[in-house]
């Protein structure tokens, strides 16, 4: 079988396609976790995995096929993938969640109606503790990044 030669893809096109396919591939990783039985249980966050055995197998088979197509696109179009570092992901999520915690301070909760000062004080205290812990985690990652990349301020 003769391989067909494809025209070169421009840099902007490559980036656009690569980003989209990286997001798809990341989603496939999540689907694969679910199909392999993923189920997390915590305080406010619970996952219920009601996928049947047959459905899990079918999803995994589709993922394998899709990754084959992704591999062809990657190779044939000379695309680049993305690399997700644990330190960067955790650090970014800490910063994003911190913004939501600030929005739950008593003075900001007033926009939803009056809140008793004692209740506002209690919520503020707990949110401050959570924010301190997020800052600790974020700081650990910043320190980790500095140890791995001297001279850099990013994780």
Image: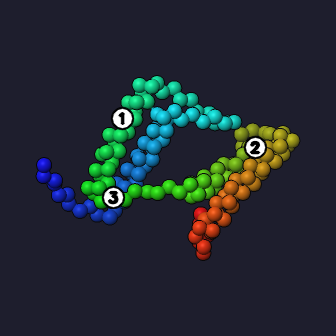
Q: Identify which residue is drawn at 70% across, 53% down.
A: 134
* Viewer-side residue, 20 vs 117: 20
Q: Position of residue 121 (x, y in %)?
A: 84, 45
Q: Nearer the viewer, mark 2 or mark 3?
A: 3
Give the numbered dot on residue 79. Answer: 3
SS for callout 3: loop
Q: Is residue 99 left or right of residue 83?
A: right
Q: CA distance from mark 3 to mark 1?
A: 24 Å
Q: Label 1 belongs to which residue?
A: 61
SS for callout 1: helix
Q: Position of residue 104 (x, y in %)?
A: 72, 46
Q: Position of residue 48 (x, y in %)?
A: 56, 29
Q: Quadrant of the C terminus?
A: bottom right
Q: Is residue 30 left or right of residue 75?
A: right
Q: Residue furthest bottom?
A: 151
Q: Identify which residue is drawn at 37% across, 50% down.
A: 21
Q: Nearer the viewer, mark 2 or mark 1?
A: 1
Q: Label 2 belongs to which residue?
A: 110
Q: Identify which residue is drawn at 73% across, 52% down.
A: 133
Q: Identify which residue is drawn at 64% across, 53% down.
A: 94
Can I make out residue 15 in this image? yes
């Amino acid at each position: 079988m003769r391989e067909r030669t494809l025209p070169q893809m421009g840099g902007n096109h490559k980036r656009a396609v690569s980003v989209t396919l990286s997001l798809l591939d990341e989603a496939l990783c999540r689907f694969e976790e679910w199909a392999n039985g993923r189920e997390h249980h915590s305080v406010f966050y619970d996952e219920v995995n009601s996928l049947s055995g047959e459905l899990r197998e079918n999803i995994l088979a589709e993922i394998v096929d899709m990754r084959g197509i992704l591999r062809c696109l990657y190779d044939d179009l000379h695309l680049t993938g993305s690399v997700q570092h644990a330190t960067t992901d955790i650090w970014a999520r800490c910063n994003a969640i911190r913004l939501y915690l600030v929005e739950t301070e008593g003075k900001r909760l007033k926009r939803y109606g009056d809140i008793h000062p004692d209740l506002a004080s209690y919520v503020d205290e707990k949110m401050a503790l959570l924010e301190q812990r997020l800052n600790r985690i974020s700081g650990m990652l910043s320190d980790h990044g500095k140890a791995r990349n001297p001279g850099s301020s990013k994780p």
